[in-house]
Amino acid sequence: TTRNLQPAMVAVLLWFVATLQLSMHAAEMSQSRKPSPVQVLVIGAGSISREYALHHLTPRSTRCVVVGIVDSDLGRAQKLAAEVASLQLGAEVTTDRGNRYCSRVVSLEKNPKTINVPFYPSIDDALSAMGPEVDLVYIGTPPGSHRPLVERALDYDKHVLLEKPLASTANDADAIVAAADGAEKHRGILLGMNIGMRYNAALTEMRRRILENDEFCLAEDDNPRLVATLHLHFRKWPREWQTQPWCASRSEGGPCREVGTHFFSALLEFASGAKSTAVSQKIVPLAARVKATVTYPTKKIHQVASKPFDPCENSAHGTIEFMGGALPPGGLTVVISVETDETLQRDLYELTIASGEHDSNAFTLFDFCSLRNSHTGEILVKNSDYGRKECVEALVSVAFRKEREDCDKSVSPSIVTAKDGRRAQLLLDAILESQGEWKDVDLS
């Protein structure tokens, strides 16, 4: 009997070995097909670049990996490069009360492994040294430096993720739009912007309730319209983590440019897009006009490291009127208030949109990522993600669609383009230039 069982046992054993080999081969093939991380060169080692390098440009977050740091301050570049290397070895990141601008890496002790993340004083030095290793360039520097950095990155045929605002001047902004358009059209190279309002769940829910579900019953009014208030009030400017002098300068910083850009983008996202149930007429292009008054400190210049500059605004008050797009026939009128007030208990970031006819209907987007019913106080969305990670994911998904097998090729994420950033800057420029007179803004 034992002799008769031996052939059967051998057959079973052979079948088991063959099955195991097939499984191992399938696992190896699956591993080989797994897309390589997108390799990112980070330009700038300030607060926003630190957030991106330590939180959003990581294999765990977005399947990106930082392969180099550029900053004219080599000490700062070296510090961030060392932190990125520690993070890639498994170190943990901590924040100050949840503020990712104030992140730091808790280094591993006695780790025998080493990773070298190089650092450079300029984008040309970096891309000359490691060009083929870089897939994407993240630019997190002051807006006055954006144009030359974007142009150099695109010259090297690198996809770009650019911080807001688009630029510090209209000429530079237009040049970036032209460079981005040319790179995409002729070489398939893309530029996306870090303006996360498009992916903000709180703003999306606000728009859904007001324009798509028509919870204000706008379609029942003879001339439906929306009214809004935008309050951006700060205890101090620059804020605690904004330690670089440019944040307080008139040419590159200030609350309207640094924070207002987010909310101008939010208003454009709200008013654009698909036709709403409250719009009965044919869709027309979105247009706007602005009237505002901006005040500045009485001191004409600040002295920082013996380098003078004009200080940024300490208040801005005015009105933005939107017509067309997905808005009801009466449009959207936004009263804006930007102030610095040391008596405040906390900074205030609030956009409230209400029915122009029934003031009992209103929703408030607050602290960037939360939404409440303005009258009942009910929290409808609480502390959603702002959209920084989504900005990276959208650009990576589209730019590397052919190379990546993990993305759904039937879905086309909407990148926040240079043109989108330019529209937000057009509103900003009109506010800063208005001087109490109406200025038409062509958003087409």
Image (cartoon, rainbow, N blue to C red):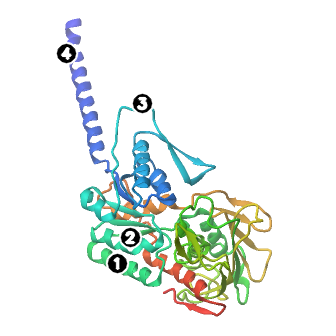
Q: Are circles 2 and 1 on residues that touch, CB within 8 Å? A: yes
For the N terminus, the quadrant is: top left
Mark 4, residue position: 7
Label whose residue precedes the other's in the sequence (4 or 1): 4
- Residue 377: image location, x then y, percent: 78, 63
- Graded by Cα atoms within 10 Å as few (under 14), some (14 to 19) or many (20 or more), the crowding at tag 4 reads few
- Residue 104: image location, x then y, percent: 52, 47
Amino acid type, mark 3: Lys
The residue shown at (42%, 72%) is: 146
Q: Are circles 3 and 2 on residues that touch, CB within 8 Å? A: no
Q: Of the residues tagged 4 and 2, which is closer to the observer? A: 2
Which quarter of the figure has residue 335? bottom right
Of residues 91 and 247, the one nearer the viewer is 247
Mark 2, residue position: 191
Label whose residue precedes the other's in the sequence (3 or 4): 4
Please tell me whether mark 1 sits on a helix, a strand or a loop.
Answer: helix
Q: Of the residues tagged 3 and 2, which is closer to the observer? A: 3
Amino acid type, mark 2: Leu
Q: Is residue 29 above or below residue 10?
A: below
Q: Is residue 198 above or below residue 103?
A: below
Mark 3–mark 2 distance (CA, rounded to whole Å): 41 Å
Label whose residue precedes the other's in the sequence (3 or 1): 3
Q: Residue furthest front?
A: 306
Mark 3, residue position: 110
The residue shown at (31%, 79%) is: 182
The residue shown at (43%, 39%) is: 90
Mark 3–mark 1 distance (CA, rounded to whole Å): 47 Å
Q: Is residue 57 left or right of residue 335?
A: left
